[in-house]
């Protein structure tokens, strides 16, 4: 069959590789001059930055992807990070997650290690119950939940559909700072821990069990390797080709039309259903979901080395609720948690590339063009939390939600499409098989969700739905 994949983000690249490996004739159309989408790279004066993802989890998903399409690339090397994440608090204390997390937690706050171990035990059961039906299969709306209720009633109790991630933290964790650590995992899906389901406890479990990984040379190497794989398999990759209309068996670009027996869209589902295809039921469904958060990124080229940082460090504030109220209330947070990434080998000797990310409301509700001072504000927040780099900045590059929208087509710069806010959020997320015959969806805004591994899983699900040529 002739398959046209729209968008060369990780989902599009993975779908194109899988479909080509299954014998389809695949054309991959990407509006930007480069592949990768949100998985981007920025280089200047010997400094290199991953502009989006900096942490890879569930590497097995990528092992499977490369294995199924021809084998692991010899020049792609993953490193397991130890420590995984350094968590720093405004009282001056910190602890590292990773292999020694339990002992580290006990030393940091007596009882916290035991609490976290008990929490992980529950999280592991949540992961086991949710993995197959919710992550590795196409979702069939409430039918998925109903079949779970009938076949594995215990699993439904484990998932506790009515409970939030915050509820779970309150139940298992006594130290309010540790509750804040758990809360932050909701933002891995662009969500609010007070509204996101307890099932998101699977995220810290997965990180704990399978580790957090870095790709040597930067995470963008993943996009490059996927592109190489597509080319090896005969995928016709066309960059700088923006699709304007999707109506299988036809795909229309700004400069012509292509025949397509099947179309796989890796664009933001909100862009697809608003701009590219007529599908009122899908549009209505999407309107019922809360869009995910965006992010505000600072890439700092620094003189010297910043003491006290791990590869990944989070500088927590005091009031996570105030941050969530702000960003979900369409205001930039005044005292946000600040996420820092400092990968090795990404800067000239005696210098460092520091990637800074904070949660941010989407562009549209907030006019990010009108927030020129926010980068300085974030630098001031970091300085108050003990990471004052202001006098060592050689240059800086800012990526606002408006920039993210412009560069990747994510409506409002929402990183994950729809958020997981609310008990039925998973069922409002656009399905991999659209109601339009011949049109399938992959990528972070469709099922099973955002983040590199889930995006790659969406491609696996879709290639399974389409089948071999
Ligand atoms: C700042 C930031 C930090 C992140 N951190 C992490 C992390 O640490 N770990 C992690 O796992 N994930 C992280 N993520 C999430 C992860 O990057 C995404 O979930 C994933 O890369 C999305 O892939 P995708 O397949 O949905 O495609 P996208 O990356 O959304 O790409 C879609 C592609 O479609 C193209 N396109 C759009 N419209 C059209 C059109 N009309 N015609 C043709 N092409 C079109 C776009 O140009 C783009 O290339 C982060 C994201 C951001 C932004």
Image (spheres, rainbow, N blue to C red):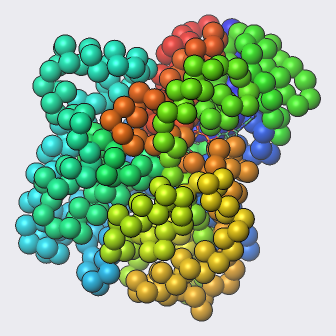
x, y percentage for residue 463? 54, 18
Horizontally, is 197 left or right of 413 in the view? left
The residue closer to the viewer here, 76 or 184, is 184
Look at 51% across and 52% down and name the residue there: 293
Residue 9 occupies quadrant = top right
**Taking 232 as reference, is 466 above or below it?**
above
| Number of numbered tags placed on the structure image | 0
**Residue drawn at x 83%, y 23% as measured from the top left:** 252
| Rendered residue at 17%/19% (across/down) | 152
Residue 386, percent from left and from top: 41, 86
Q: Position of residue 430 (x, y in %)?
A: 52, 27
- Above or below, 98 against 8 in this view is below
Up/down of 435 relative to 283, above or below: above
Q: Nearer the viewer, residue 67 or 264?
A: 264
Q: Can the viewer see residue 77? A: no
Question: What residue is shown at x 73% (from left), y 27% (from top)?
Answer: 276
Residue 251, compared with residue 273, is above or below; it is above
Look at the image and tell me whether residue 399 can be seen: yes
């Amino acid at each position: 069959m002739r398959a046209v994949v729209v968008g060369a983000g990780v989902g599009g690249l993975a779908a194109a590789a899988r479909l080509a490996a299954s014998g389809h004739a695949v054309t991959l159309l990407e509006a930007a001059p480069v592949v990768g989408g949100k998985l981007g790279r920025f280089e200047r004066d010997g400094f290199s930055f991953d502009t989006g993802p900096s942490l890879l989890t569930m590497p097995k998903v990528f092992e499977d992807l490369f294995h199924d399409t021809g084998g692991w690339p010899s020049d792609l090397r993953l490193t397991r990070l130890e420590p995984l994440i350094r968590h720093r608090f405004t009282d001056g204390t910190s602890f590292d997650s990773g292999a020694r997390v339990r002992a580290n937690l006990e030393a940091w706050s007596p009882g916290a290690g035991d609490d976290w171990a008990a929490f992980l035990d529950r999280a592991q059961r949540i992961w086991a119950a949710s993995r197959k039906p919710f992550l590795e299969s196409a979702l069939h709306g409430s039918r998925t939940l109903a079949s779970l209720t009938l076949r594995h009633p215990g699993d439904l109790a484990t998932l506790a559909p009515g409970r939030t991630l915050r509820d779970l933290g309150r139940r298992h964790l006594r130290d309010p700072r540790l509750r804040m650590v758990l809360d932050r995992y909701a933002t891995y899906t662009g969500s609010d821990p007070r509204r996101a389901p307890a099932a998101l406890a699977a995220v810290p479990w997965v990180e704990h069990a399978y580790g957090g990984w870095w790709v040597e040379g930067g995470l963008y190497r993943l996009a490059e390797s996927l592109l190489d794989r597509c080319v090896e398999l005969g995928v016709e990759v066309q960059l700088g080709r923006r699709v304007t209309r999707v109506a299988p068996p036809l795909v229309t670009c700004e400069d012509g039309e292509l025949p397509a027996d099947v179309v796989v869209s890796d664009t933001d589902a909100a862009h697809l259903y608003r701009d590219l295809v007529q599908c009122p039921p899908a549009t209505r469904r999407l309107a019922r979901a809360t869009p995910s958060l965006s992010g505000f990124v600072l890439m700092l080229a620094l003189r010297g080395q910043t003491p006290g940082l791990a590869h990944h460090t989070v500088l927590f504030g005091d009031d996570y609720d105030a941050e969530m109220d702000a960003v979900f209330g369409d205001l930039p947070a005044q005292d946000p948690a600040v996420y820092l990434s400092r990968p090795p080998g990404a800067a000239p000797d005696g210098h460092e590339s520091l990637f800074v990310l904070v949660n941010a409301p989407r562009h549209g509700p907030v006019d990010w063009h009108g927030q020129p001072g926010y980068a300085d504000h974030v630098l001031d927040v970091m300085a108050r939390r003990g990471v004052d780099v202001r006098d060592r900045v050689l240059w800086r590059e800012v990526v606002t939600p408006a920039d993210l929208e412009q560069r990747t087509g994510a409506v409002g710069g929402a990183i994950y499409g729809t958020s997981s806010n609310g008990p039925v959020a998973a069922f409002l997320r656009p399905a991999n098989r659209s109601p339009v015959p011949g049109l399938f969806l992959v990528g972070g805004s469709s099922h099973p969700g955002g983040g590199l591994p889930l995006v790659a899983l969406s491609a696996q699900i879709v290639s399974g739905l389409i089948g071999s040529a």
